Amino acid sequence: MTISPSQREVHVQVAGVTRIYPAAGDHPPVHALGPVDLTLRKGEFFAVIGPSGCGKSTLLEVLAGLQKPTAGRVTFEGQLVSGTVPEGIGVVFQEDASFPWLTVWDNAAFGLRRNGVKEAEVRRRVDDALSFMGLKDFTRAYPSHLSGGMRQRVCIARTLVLQPRFILLDEPFGALDAQTRLLMGDEMLRLWRRTGATVLLITHALDEAAMLADRVGAMSARPGRFIEIIDTGWPRERDSGIVAEAAFGEITGRLWERLRGESMKALGYDAAAMAAE
Amino acid sequence: MTAARRATDTFVIAGAILVAWQVLHQIAGTTALPAPLPTLSYLLQLVPSARFAENAAATLEAFGLALLLACLIGLAVGVWMGAHRLSGAVGEPILVALYSLPKITLYPVVLLIFGLGLSGKVVFGAMHGILPIALLTMGAIRAIPSVYLRSARALHLSPWQTIATVLLPAALPEVFTGLRIGFTVTLLGVLLGEMFASKLGLGSMIMTDMSLAQSEDMITVALILFVFAAFANALLLWVEHKLQRRA
Amino acid sequence: MTRIGLIRLAVIAALIGGFELACRAGLVNHRIVIPPSEMAGALAALLASGAINSDIERTLGVVAVVIALSVTFGFAAGIAIHALPRLREALEPLFATYYAVPIFIFYPVLIAIFGLSPIPIVLIGVATAIVAMIIATINGLDRIPRVLSKVARVHRLGRIATAVRLQLPAAAPYLFTGVKLSVSYGFIAVIAAEFILSPAGLGRDISDAYTDFNNRRMYALILFLLIIATVVNTALHALDTRWSERRTGGRP
């Protein structure tokens, strides 16, 4: 029997994190995020969902060490995260970050080569990761010849070879169509089970969050704060087929209930006035 | 960044150039490089003079004719190669290769064929201008959405009507860019021609000044040419932007 | 070779061949233009005799210096200007008009200052070529995707590693366009300078042959210059196209 997520040790701790972007040019300071508190357990899959502009990407960057919080602190494996990306953290970005001047194979191997890892080991890990991501037949191709989805898989493979213990994904499937996204969701779950890493996924898709995660954090409109964290209770061995389960509908419904007002706020609607109509 | 700050920054740069000029003048001496202020006063004397008017007229005449020729041939070639896919595909690399050639190499041939007078300068200037006009016109025509052409066919327009009323207006902004670049290189071509082998014109005036060590005259004429070209280009750019907005 | 490539080759061959026939048939005045085959023959003889070797060295040497200076200093200046946005905005009008004015007209002024030596030629060559490199460098740096700097930090690359392994390759196609233009402009400026006034060099040679009515020598030299310029520019253009295809391959 597997240990439930809540019993495992704490992997990432977020305490009172706030991020305010300082004034620049004509813009006043922007309070983008927080205060946010969050505890991630080792090996759990956590999804963050919220309306556009709520600060989800900011949260991801602070967690990764790409931005320093204006207040509060983040610890990863007990160490403070501040300003530099700690070893053991991998990030997959929203934009296509594949390097067009390298082949798929060289793209995947990119992070490994510098760390003094032996060539044979590099080859093993890269072949393994590309095979796992279904790119075995494309190792010599250049990213510009591949579809958007495949390019994202190259970026994921590049992250995988470094064997990160904490993987952050910022809306990696945002540009893909809905069906491809569900399939990519299955890939993410395989990856998660295979690596045993802690995963934090940022998404704007309710079904994706509800299907993939152990816990889903619903975030308010800017400045982003968690309004509710829902425990999905899914078993570890799950795939996109759970969209048929009744519980899936309940979870998605609850998320939308919490988020609908926030989304309208983010888009500028007056929620109360609309409800009164 | 506000417009006022940008304008002051540009003035600072202009000022820096003048200061650099003054410094170079101190180093090189008046016979080599006159100072900015004396140059300005010399300019005010030179422009109304008969000598200047004569030479400027000669250059303008050659330039005007060369530009006209370059436009006519360049547009014709550009339209043809743009509309006729095969010719375009075959000819484009040839034009591109010609564009990057040092055309001065062919000037002696032009002189042998057309002689030392006006026609030589005009042909040489036109040679420079034809290429960017043709290339950019070709690109502009190719970029026209095919639905325009289908509409023209549906409206039973003749080939000439199609070109005049559909192709050229649709392609106008980019064609105009070609004309603007053509303007610049044709002017350069005419001046080069005058510098190499001519008795009349601003280019040859500069060469004569150099051999007679009349630096003030030389740099003043150069300056006049710069200012003329800069203003003409600014004007053409303004028209170009107006056309792009409308497109 | 593609079908279009073959057609192109055929067209060029037909033009040259047709011209050859026209010359041989007496349709073209032999005192004005000689047949292409004679040009080639004269060139072969000239090269074999080694008479123009020093001039070749001189011209190509000056061009090489111009390209080296323009590319290195243009690249450095481009990086510097890109890093200083206020300076960049102030210089914008200068860059916009630079290639609109006949910079070359300045060559006689340079001769007046520096005398009749390679220096004014190198200076006018660099003046013509360097701004293309600066503009291309700035453009290339602009186009580095912003996500790349984040990837660099995720992989914990230092500043130099980030510049060399990520920024440089990302900007490379645009930088190469700058190099291509620098080569082309530099070559044009140097040859033009040698034509107008120079103590030595292939341009001077052609100019002398023209004034001496030595048509064979003149056409041989013209052919030589045209061949070199075409070969170099075409090669650079082909490389440029191939590398950017690898980048975009149909998808931007």
Image (cartoon, coloured by chain):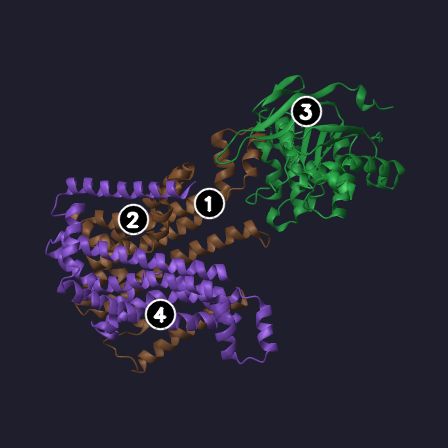
Marks 2,1: beta carbons within 8 A: no
Q: CA distance from mark 2 to mark 1?
A: 21 Å
- Disc number lying in front (3 or 2): 3
Which chain contains the residue that carries disc 3?
Answer: A
Residue located beneath label 4 in the image: B70
Q: Amino acid at mark 4?
A: Ala
Residue C102 place in picture, x, y as percent: 28, 56
Residue located beneath label 1 in the image: C140
Q: Residue at x 77, y 28 (%)?
A: A229
Which chain contains the residue that carries disc 2?
Answer: C
Instruction: Answer few, some or many: residues within 10 Å of disc 2's Cα (few below 14, many 20 plus, some between 14 and 19).
Output: many
Marks 1,3: beta carbons within 8 A: no
Q: CA distance from mark 4 to mark 3?
A: 68 Å
Q: CA distance from mark 3 to mark 2?
A: 57 Å
Q: Secondary structure at mark 1?
A: helix
Q: Is residue B149 left or right of residue C19?
A: right
- Chain drawn green in the picture: A
Q: Amino acid at mark 1?
A: Gly
Q: Amino acid at mark 2?
A: Ala
- Disc number lying in front (4 or 2): 4
Residue B5 place in picture, x, y as percent: 38, 40
Residue located beneath label 3 in the image: A36
